[in-house]
Amino acid sequence: MMKRTFSWLSAWALASGLLMVSCSFPDEKDDTDPIETGTIELQFDNIVGSQDLQLDNARYSNAAGEDFTVSKLNYYISNIKLLKMDGSAFTVPQDSSYFMIREAHPESQKLTLRNVLTGDYTGVEFMVGVDSVRSVMEPDRRKGILDQYSGPTNEEGMYWDWNPGYIFLMLEGHSDLATTANGKYYYHIGGFGGRTTRTINNLKTVKLTFPGQKAIVTTSIVSNVLIQADILKIFNGQTQMSIQKNSSLMFADSSKYIADNYAGMFSVKEIKMN
Amino acid sequence: MTKFTGILSLLAALLALAVSCRKSGTDDPDPKPSDNTPTPLQWMKPSYFPDPVYDLSKNPLTVEGVELGKFLFYDGILSRTDNIGCGTCHQQQAAFTHHGHDLSHGVDDKIGTRNAPSVQNMAWNTSFFWDGGVHDLDLVPPVPIQNKVEMDERVSNVIEKLKKTPVAGAAKQVDYPKMFKAAFGSDSITADRMMKALSQFMMTMVSATSRYDYFVRGDASAMTAQEKDGMTIFKQKCASCHAGELFTDQKFRNNGLVPNRINDQGRYDITLNADDRLKFKVPSLRNVGLTAPYMHDGRFTTLEQVLDHYANDKPGNKDSIYVSPTLDPLLNVAGQRRGISLTSAEKQSIIAFLKALNDDDFIKDKRFSDPGVGTSF
C-alpha cells in the first residue's frame, strides 16, 4: 500500500510539474519539432578612452579639460534582443532580462543568456535602465536584481524611494573642479516617464551591430560578445558636460544630456567563440 | 482500500499544488496551521467618509499584523543609529507630528527640509509627502528609513537586524521572528512583509472622533455657536481646497508663500513640470490645532499666523502673498486684493472651528501608543 501511495504521489508530482512547465511557456505547443537552444555571453568592459577603467586610483581627463576619478559606476542593462541579418530577432524573456553592471563587481559584468534560439546573430539591442512597464509594477514583480529592498539595488541605492523609480546609471567620483563640499561629483540618472503624471524619460535603447562578425549560438558553441562602455563619452558626447558646471546631476531636466551621452558609449569590441 | 488510498493521495497532491500556487517559498511547514493563523481585524470606515484609497484586499488587516506594525513604527531599529523610529518625528500627542519642530532632526541631529506631516487617516491618501512623490502607503516607510538626514539606514540592513532579535541586553526585548510568524504565518522576515505590517498599523490610525465628528453624527451640542459660525465661514472661504471630510482636496497648490532659503520647489521636484513649481500638497486639517508649526517648512507657529497669511492684511498694506506664475488662482482674483478676505472676528471663528477638529480620543488611544520601544527627542 505504501509503495502504491508513493507512486501515485510521484505521478501527481510529475503531472503538476509538467503543468507548471507548460504554464511557463505558453507559446510552445509543438513538441514534435524540438527547438534547439544554446547560450550566449555578453561581456561588458568599462573603459575610459583607450584605458581600462580603474576605480579610485586612476585620474582621467574629460574634453572640458577636467581631471576626475571614478569611485562608483553602476548601470542597468535590460530588455535584451539578439538580432539576425534578416531583421528577425530573439527576444530574451523579459523576466530574465534585467541586469546591473557594477564596476566594483567583475562577476556582474558577464551576462550569461541561456535558452537562446540557435542561429547566427549579427547584432544586439538592449535598454540602459528599467522600462516603464516594469518600473510601475508592484514590488513583488520586481525581485532579484530589481528588488528595491535587498541585494545590489538596495545596497547601491539604485532606487529613488521619494519618487519611486530606478536610477538607471550612477557615476560618482572626485574632481578638483567639483563644486560640492567634499569634492565629489554625482551623476544619478533615471526617469522612466512618470507614473501618474508625465515627466522626464531617460530610457535609452542601444542597438549595436557586430562588426564583420557573427555571434554563433549552437547547442555546443557559446559566443562571448565583448561590449565596451567608454565612460569618457558620458562627458564628451553629443553635449559636452563639465563637472564644474554640473557637479551633481540627479532628477533634473539636464540629466537628459547625460542619458543621451551614455546611450552612445557602447560598442562591440570582439566576439569569441568557445 | 487501495482505491481509497489513491484518492486520498490524489487529494493531498492537489492540496499541495493549490498551496504552492497560492504562495511561493514562504509556506509554513508547521503541520498545525490553525495555531498560526492570524486573527482577522475588520477595518471600519466612518460612515460619512469616502471609500478608502488603500486596497485592503492586497493586505487584509490582522490583529497580529497591526501589532507588529505598531512595534516597527516605534522601534529605533529602523535607523542606522538604532534610536530614531517613525514615532520619533510622528508623536501621538501632536497627532503624529513632531511637536515643536519646524523641521525635524534625524540621525546625528541632521536637519530635514520639510515639516513632518501628520500620520492619520492614511487610508484615504491618494499620495504621500508634501510633494506627493509616493502613491502607495506600502512605499512610504522606505523614504524616511533610507533618507540620509532622517533614519539613514538601508532596508536590507533593517531586515538583517530584525532577524537577529531579540537582542540580549536590550531595554525592551522584542522578538521580531516570533511577531512576523504571528502576523504572517511563518517567521520569514522580508521587506514586503515589514511594509505591509506598517501599512496595517497606519490603516488603523483613523481620526474621526473630534467634536466636529460628534456634531456631524447628530450631536448638535458638540460644537459651540462660535465654532458653528466658524464652520460656516470655513465652508465659504477655505473648503474649496480643504474639502470634504478629510479637509483636503489632495491637490498640489501654490498658496503664495515666499520661497524659502533652499528655494524648495515642492511638487516640481517630482514632475519637473514648470506648472508645478512651488506647489505643495494641500494638507488635511484634522487635528490641525495639535500639529503646529504649519506649512511645508513649519514657518508659521500659530493658526493666527496662517490665517494672517491667507488674509494678506498685514499692517502697512504690504502684500504678503508671493506672486509667481503658479500662484493659486483662488488667491489671486482679478479686481480684488490678493488672498482671502477675512475679518478679525471671522478669523477667530475659523480658528475656533479648526480646534473642534482636535481629536482627543485619537491622541490618547492606547492602540496607537508606543509599546515601550520608542524614542522621542
Image (cartoon, coloured by chain):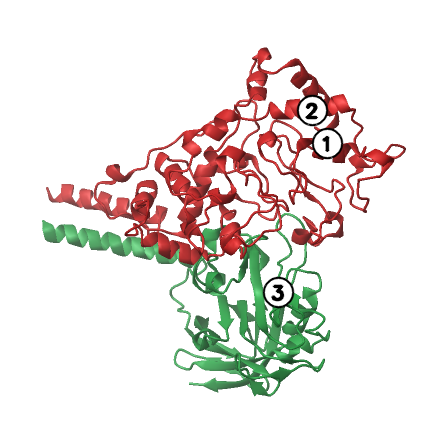
Chain colours: A green, B red
Are dots 2 and 1 on a single chain? yes
Going by the numbered disc 2, the residue's amino acid type is Ile
Query: Marks 2 and 1: CB-CB under 8 Å?
Result: yes
- Residue B203 picture location, percent across and down: 48, 36
Front position in the image: B202 or B118: B118
- Residue A61 picture location, percent across and down: 65, 83
Residue B147 higher or lower than B136, as above or below: below
Local crowd size for mark 3, using a 10 Å CA cut-off: few (<14), some (14–19), many (≥20): many
Query: Marks 1 and 3: CB-CB under 8 Å?
Result: no
Front position in the image: B173 or B1: B173
Local crowd size for mark 2, using a 10 Å CA cut-off: few (<14), some (14–19), many (≥20): many
**CA separation in Å, label 1 and label 3:** 41 Å
Kindly tell me whether residue A234 is visible in this rendering.
Answer: yes
Which of the 4 image quarters holds residue A87?
bottom right
Local crowd size for mark 1, using a 10 Å CA cut-off: few (<14), some (14–19), many (≥20): many
Query: Marks 3 and 2: CB-CB under 8 Å?
Result: no
**CA separation in Å, label 3 and label 2:** 47 Å
Which of the 4 image quarters holds residue B308?
top right
User: Could you say whether the residue bearing mark 1 is in a helix, strand or loop?
Assistant: helix
Are dots 1 and 3 on a single chain? no
From the viewer's perspective, is the residue at label 1 or at label 3 nearer?
1
Going by the numbered disc 1, the residue's amino acid type is Leu
Going by the numbered disc 3, the residue's amino acid type is Ile
Name the residue located 67 percent from the left edge and 48 percent from the top edge. B267
Kindly tell me whether residue B95 is visible in this rendering.
Answer: no
Chain at tag 1: B
Residue under label 1: B307
Q: Which mark is residue B350?
A: 2
Residue under label 3: A189
Chain at tag 3: A
- Residue A175 picture location, percent across and down: 63, 77
